[in-house]
Amino acid sequence: MKRLARATVAAVTVLGLGVPGIVGAASNINTGGPSSVTNVSENMNHNTSQQNNNTLGASATASQGASTGTANVSGNTTGGAAGTGAATNNNSVGANVTISNPSASEAAAPAVMGGGVSNVNTGGPSSVANVTSNMNVNSSVQNNTNVSVSTSTSQSASTGSANVSGNTTGGSATTGNASNNTSSQFNLVVTN
């Protein structure tokens, strides 16, 4: 009976090493008789292989042009004021991508359930019970992640001409502002 107790403790210790769900098949040994030798061998193998291929690509292309017209005051006795308005372009791009792959411990968790060695009854005088329990868990996880981010921005801004000429009394001529704004934001998160 002492040998069985040691084998059972060893099996429980293996189960406590972070591999949930593995328990050996149930064995019942009854009436072994005097001076009998009973051998029980349990072998379990659990092999998992997991490959995660992630390809993330993000790109933003913006082409912008802004220009103002021409302000001209000419050929007047008394010139007034002339002006052009502002020309503005705005561009904004945002992307959030999240990928979560199962962890190695999740991939290794087997679906094998059982009862383990449960009973050794009435072995008889001078009988021997040998119990061997082997549990092997092999897990292979390969993560291949490719991330590419590219942005391309082409911008141009120009103001028109301001001309005051040929007036007895000249006024004013102004052109507005020409501006371009662009913004790109990418958040790519991969969890293995």
Image (cartoon, helix red, strand yellow):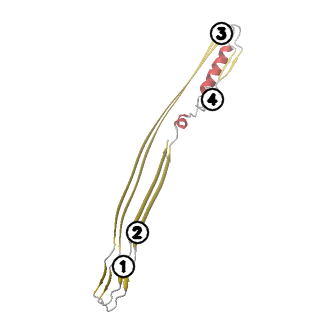
Dot in front, 3 or 4: 4
Q: Which residue is mark 4?
A: 114
| Tag 2 near tag 3, CB within 8 Å | no
Q: Which residue is mark 2?
A: 89
| Tag 2 near tag 4, CB within 8 Å | no
| Tag 1 near tag 2, CB within 8 Å | no
Q: CA distance from mark 1 to mark 2?
A: 20 Å
Q: Secondary structure under badge 4?
A: loop
| Tag 1 near tag 3, CB within 8 Å | no
Q: The residue under label 1 is which amino acid type?
A: Thr
Q: Which residue is mark 1?
A: 174
Q: CA distance from mark 4 to mark 1?
A: 88 Å
Q: Which residue is mark 3?
A: 36
Q: CA distance from mark 3 to mark 4?
A: 27 Å
Image location of residue 29, percent across then percent down: 67, 18
Q: Earlier in the sequence, mark 2 or mark 3?
A: 3
Q: The residue under label 3 is which amino acid type?
A: Ser
Residue at (59% x, 25% y) in the render: 14
| Tag 3 near tag 4, CB within 8 Å | no
Q: The residue under label 4 is which amino acid type?
A: Gly
Which quadrant of the figure has residue 118?
A: top right
Instruction: State whether residue 149 is above or below residue 114.
Output: below
Dot in front, 2 or 3: 2
Left or right relative to 4: residue 104: left
Q: Residue furthest front?
A: 169
Q: The residue under label 2 is which amino acid type?
A: Asn
Q: CA distance from mark 2 to mark 3?
A: 93 Å
